[in-house]
Structure formats: structure tokens, C-alpha cells
Image: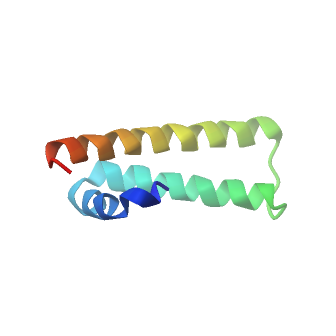
Amino acid sequence: MLHEYRDIISKLKVENAHFAKIFEKHNELDDKIKEVEEGREHMDQLELETLKKEKLRLKDEAYTMILQYKKEHNL
């Protein structure tokens, strides 16, 4: 997720517990979605779409926090 911000993400994961939680939950959802899409796990389409929307919401929240960090640190 957001690989171009790798350095900021590393710092935020250490400095901000909420960001770390968001990042971890996003990655968990990403893994679960891949399992379903690759046929290793079964889930109805509505559940899958709900997971995808939650994953996107978390990514948006993390991205907002990254931009705020950049602004506060003049990066």
C-alpha cells in the first residue's frame, strides 16, 4: 500500500498507534480478499465487496494521515 511513501509509513507505524492499526487491518483485508479471489477461500459477492470497500476506506484514511505528516514535516 502506497509504496512511494515507504519512509513516511515506517515512521508513522512507530510514532502513531492508530496509523499502525489502520495499516495492519488494511493488509489483513488485502490478504483475505486475495484468498477469496484466488479461490482458496469462499465468500459471497456482497461480503467480498464489503471487504473491498473497507480496505479502500482504510487506505484513504492512511493516505490522509501520510499527507498530513508530509505537511507537518515540510516533506
Instruction: Give the residue furthest to the front.
Output: 75
- Asked whether 8 or 21 is in front, the reply is 8
Q: Please state which of residues 66 and 55 is positioned toward the viewer in this rendering.
A: 66
Residue 67 spot, x, y in % from top left:
30, 42
Q: Residue at x 51, y 52 (%)?
A: 26
Please give left or right for residue 51 compared with residue 35 in the image: left
Decide: is 29 above or below 46.
below
Q: Quadrant of residue 36?
A: bottom right
Q: Is residue 20 left or right of residue 56?
A: left
Q: Residue at x 40, y 39 (%)?
A: 61
Residue 64 image position (x, y, % from top left): 35, 38
Estimate the x, y position of residue 51 in percent, counting from the top left: 64, 42
Vertical order, 52 against 19 (above or below) = above
Residue furthest to the left in view is 73
Total marks shown come to 0
Left or right: 10 in relation to 49: left
Name the residue located 66 percent from the left edge and 57 percent from the top edge: 32
Picture quadrant of residue 9 = bottom left
Coordinates of residue 59 in the picture (x, y in percent):
48, 44
